[in-house]
């Protein structure tokens, strides 16, 4: 590869790495905006812990769990290439990226994805989980569960070879391997954790618990939308003009369509223009297009996004109906729309067909079973040993003071007193 092209690829991947890193700001803003003021420090602490510890865990062993170099004839389920990172002497990446950028850029870009899975869980369990058990869960889930699931496809494992030389399961940037991994974990966590005090009335009807800063939540979604240009654009694994441009277009159109679809349906159903539904519709469109952003035409991307927006409204209603409490809509956005986006690869785009749809279903089911069982074991064990729920008094007073001894808006609280 000529030096100029190598440099261009590497610079593009570093820009995408920075954009994906910036997404953690978006997640933090979204989560604190949709929850109450008294839990702001707690949510920010969890998000900072996830990105810092996530990167260290990915360096220690996660990268080599996810890209172990499965030996020929292996089952493609589990291998480990050793601790740390043993970069090639020439600094090039593994063969799957055609040596298009440096090994270190590859590690850092992939490492940014790793922490996202636990960040998704963070929003779902907000306002009532103990910080210590959540940290333990994050270490295990990010350090082991995410890279093992990722290795099944991106690391050359069994999902990538379901169809032999013709390929198999397809997940371009992680509708299943990133978003549903986090979504399955979130679903199990909120089931075992229980709802916040006041979320459901005595007769089981859901009650709104408004977030303290919708403007901040809006800023978070716009930051996430921007970051998705790196999330999906970087997954091209090069600066190829045609593919990169198409991916950015399909990503943007799906996001826009998701927002519009959710806004229209929620207005028709609830007779009010709910901004939070609009915002989650955008995120649903982004998650939905992530599995096949490089395979879809612009029109197909719009259709996928519109359906994701509809799923958002119906999914949020379903979560409330079964009496699960998800303050930020993480399960609907990342799990349900992640499943939709993964299956859409078999319905639309260049790989559409019955056989591909079977591959996609196999991937969704395999990752779902693995993540549900793993998350249940981890969280149930924590629940039975150290406990995962804060005491009632601490939940009422807020986790900021109880768990961290500080207030995110100290001057504001003092002026209230």
Image (cartoon, grey):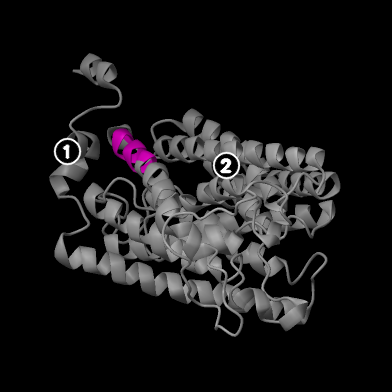
Residue 327 visible: no
Q: How many marks?
A: 2
Q: Which residue is mark 2?
A: 20
Depth check, front residue: 166 or 255:
166
Residue 195 visible: yes
Residues at marks 2 and 1 touching, judged by CB atoms closer than 8 Å: no
Quadrant of the rendered structure where residue 413 is? top left
Residue 128 in the image: x percent, y percent?
26, 49
Quadrant of the rendered structure where residue 416 is? top left
Depth check, front residue: 311 or 151:
151
Quadrant of the rendering where the C terminus is positioned:
top left
Q: Which residue is mark 1?
A: 402
Which residue appears at 32% of the width and 38% of the height? Answer: 45
Which residue appears at 37% of the width and 46% of the height? Answer: 53
- Neighbor class of circle 1 (other Cα within 10 Å; few <14, some 14-19, many 20+) is some
Main SS type for the magenta part?
Answer: helix
Q: Secondary structure at mark 2?
A: helix
CA gap, disc 2 and disc 1 = 32 Å
From the viewer's perspective, is 54 left or right of 244?
A: left
Q: Is residue 155 magenta?
A: no
Depth check, front residue: 176 or 62:
62
From the viewer's perspective, is 144 left or right of 63?
A: left
Q: Is residue 45 magenta?
A: yes
Residue 92 in the image: x percent, y percent?
66, 51
| 166 vs 204: above or below | below
Residue 330 in the image: x percent, y percent?
47, 53
From the viewer's perspective, is 303 left or right of 363?
A: right
| 174 vs 90: above or below | below
What is the magenta range? 40-48
| 271 vs 201: above or below | above
């Amino acid at each position: 590869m000529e030096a100029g092209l190598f440099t261009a690829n590497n610079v593009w991947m570093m820009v995408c790495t920075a954009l994906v890193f910036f997404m953690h700001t978006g997640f933090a803003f979204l989560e604190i905006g949709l929850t109450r003021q008294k839990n702001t420090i707690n949510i920010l602490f969890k998000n900072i812990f996830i990105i810092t510890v996530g990167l260290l865990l990915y360096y220690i062993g996660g990268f080599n769990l996810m890209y172990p170099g499965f030996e020929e004839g292996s089952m493609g389920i589990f291998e480990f290439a050793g601790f740390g990172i043993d970069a090639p002497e020439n600094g090039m990446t593994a063969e799957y990226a055609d040596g298009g950028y440096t090994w270190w850029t590859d590690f850092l870009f992939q490492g940014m994805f790793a922490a996202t899975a636990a960040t998704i869980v963070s929003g779902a369990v907000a306002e009532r989980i103990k910080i210590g058990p959540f940290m333990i869960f994050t270490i295990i889930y990010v350090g082991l569960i995410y890279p093992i699931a990722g290795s099944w496809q991106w690391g050359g494992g069994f999902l990538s070879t379901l169809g032999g030389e013709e390929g198999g399961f397809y997940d371009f940037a992680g509708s299943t391997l990133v978003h549903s991994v986090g979504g399955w974990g979130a679903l199990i966590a909120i089931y075992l954790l229980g709802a916040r005090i006041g979320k459901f009335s005595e007769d089981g009807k859901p009650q709104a618990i408004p977030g303290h800063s919708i403007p901040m939540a809006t800023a978070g979604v716009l930051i996430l939308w921007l970051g998705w240009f790196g999330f999906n654009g970087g997954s091209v694994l090069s600066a190829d003009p045609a593919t990169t441009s198409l991916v950015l277009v399909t990503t943007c159109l799906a996001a826009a369509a998701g927002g519009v679809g959710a806004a229209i349906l929620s207005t028709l159903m609830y007779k009010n223009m709910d901004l939070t539904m609009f915002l989650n519709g955008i995120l649903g469109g982004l998650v939905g297009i992530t599995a096949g952003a490089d395979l879809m035409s612009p029109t197909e991307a719009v259709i996928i996004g519109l359906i994701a927006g509809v799923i958002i409204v119906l999914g949020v209603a379903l979560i409330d109906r079964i009496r699960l409490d998800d303050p930020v809509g993480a399960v609907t956005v990342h799990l349900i729309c992640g499943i939709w986006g993964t299956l859409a690869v078999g319905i639309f785009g260049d790989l559409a067909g019955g056989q591909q749809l079977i591959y996609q279903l196999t991937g969704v089911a395999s990752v779902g079973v693995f993540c549900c069982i793993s998350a249940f074991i981890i969280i149930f064990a924590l629940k039975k040993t150290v406990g995962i729920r804060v005491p009632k008094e601490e939940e009422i007073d807020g986790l900021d003071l109880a768990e961290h001894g500080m207030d995110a808006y100290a001057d504001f609280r003092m002026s209230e007193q």
